[in-house]
Image (tube, grey):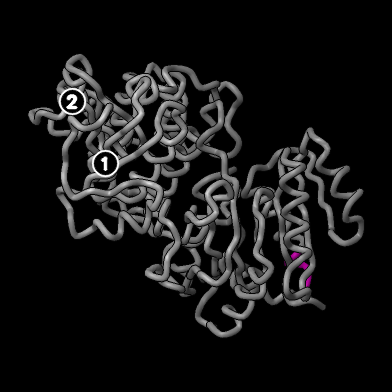
Amino acid sequence: MNDIGVIICNYNKEEYVINCIRSVMKSSISNFDVYVVDNASTDNSVERIKEEFGKEVTLIVNKDNLGGSGGFNTGLREALKHDYKYIMLLDNDIEMDKYSIEELYKFMDSHDEVGMVGSKVYFMDYPERIWGYGGNINFKSYRQEDNFKNCTDSESIPEVLYCDYVAACSLMARADAIRKVGLMPEDNFIYWDDMEWGYRFNQAGYKVAVWGKSKVWHKAGGRNAGNTFINYYMWRNRILFFLKVLPIEKRDHFSEMILSDMFQLIYSCNLKSETNIVKSVMFAFDDAIHKVSGKAADYKILPRNGQYDRMEKAIGSAKNVLIKFSGDFEGLGNIIRKVGKIGSVSKITISTIDIKDLTQQVRAQFPSCEVMETYEPFNYDFNMEMCSHIFNADLNANTEVYVDPWCNIINGKEEHAYCENYENTKKIFTLLFKELMLVK
């Protein structure tokens, strides 16, 4: 009997899942069995898996798409029938280093207190940049906080971290711990399922960790999809999670914070004419407060609309772009990737004038950019200043263009005026919906 059951969940990614299985099969150890759960794919995934791997994998084909959590749970139920010591979960668009499984296996064998450990996950399209390295749930802002997201890997990043959750795209858990804690929250369908699962492991007395010697690469294209899928599920399941775990006396504060975040998104989407995101988020809010979960009705997931390329439009034909850094490395990474895709831009410069002590770290993280401790905007074709969010920008300053970590941008007097009305409008929105949350 092998020690490890590896479960890969797939939906309509035949090329990626084939590459994922191939990378698993090339692992430095072989004391594992592979289960592939297909979530009713409509492409050739099932046929390709059968043709290439045959009896090397156990293929389970669901009649319906049960989502990430439902797909993994299908595999977990099957794997738990056997006497595995550990069970590993993998997304279909993961490619593994040959030592990834072995490193997690050795880590778990030498850390009895750990119930779940995750890999260091890199962007497949940016192989040195970290996509995920565990994270924590902030019970003051009611948000997830990913560790080292968008950072270039370096020796300064700890080799092991203990955290609230690890991404289900590459994790290993003790089979006995799963039997004690339970399966993934299947009603989520997708998103916040791994966060809740990690939280439950911690609550049950197990530690949750990430181990930097286990390395994988993740395609992870959810946020670039042409629909509002991620907007609906992330918002609904985030609200449902906190409504589930928070004591009643914190409900008032939670309502204010979540409505503030929600209005920030809505007001930003209105600026960009992204009305379908607003609709899906409001569907998510309504479902959450009425405790509706599972797979969303089709009409709640909408095609993206609006002004996708406001930054590209603002930058225009500019070749040399200057970014005034705020200290948010993850946000800076998002902005640099966005600007770097604009065809006219040939050079990106980062100014650290307000935080000179981070200059060397910025240079290490973004070696393709010039980094300066001065700020001379008139020497560049286009310049913008980072802020925590465009609606928190100092509109009384002389800065004309602000950009936030989500690549929202305000440019010019008309958009500045729109932002000036933000706080008063938010008060009205919160007043309208807060009582509804408290009653429910």
- Relative image position of residue 204 (x, y in whole percent): 48, 71
Q: Which mark is residue 146?
A: none
- In this rendering, is residue 189 above or below 424? below
- Relative image position of residue 428 (x, y in whole percent): 20, 23
The answer to whether one can see residue 194 in this image is yes
Going by the numbered disc 1, the residue's amino acid type is Met
Q: Is residue 371 left or right of residue 306?
A: left
- Sequence-wise first label, 2 or 1: 1
* Residue lying at 79% horizontally and 76% vertically, measured from the top left: 2
Residue topped by disc 1: 257
* Residue 395 covered by magenta stretch: no
Magenta part of the chain: 79-83
* Residue 81 covered by magenta stretch: yes
* Residue lying at 50% horizontally and 81% vertically, measured from the top left: 113
* Residue lying at 58% horizontally and 64% vertically, measured from the top left: 215
Quadrant into which the N terminus falls: bottom right
Which quadrant holds residue 334? top left
In this rendering, which labeled residue sits more in front, label 2 or label 1? 2
Secondary structure beneath dot 2 equals: loop
Residue topped by disc 2: 400
* Residue lying at 50% horizontally and 60% vertically, measured from the top left: 166
Magenta residues, dominant SS class: loop
Looking at the rendered structure, the number of numbered marks drawn on it comes to 2
- In this rendering, is residue 326 above or below 408? below
- Relative image position of residue 403 (x, y in whole percent): 28, 33
Within-10-Å neighbours for mark 2: few <14, some 14–19, many 20+: some
- Which of 143 and 94 lies nearest the eye of the viewer? 94
Quadrant into which the C terminus falls: top left
- In this rendering, is residue 163 above or below 368? below
Going by the numbered disc 2, the residue's amino acid type is Glu
- Relative image position of residue 298 (x, y in whole percent): 61, 24
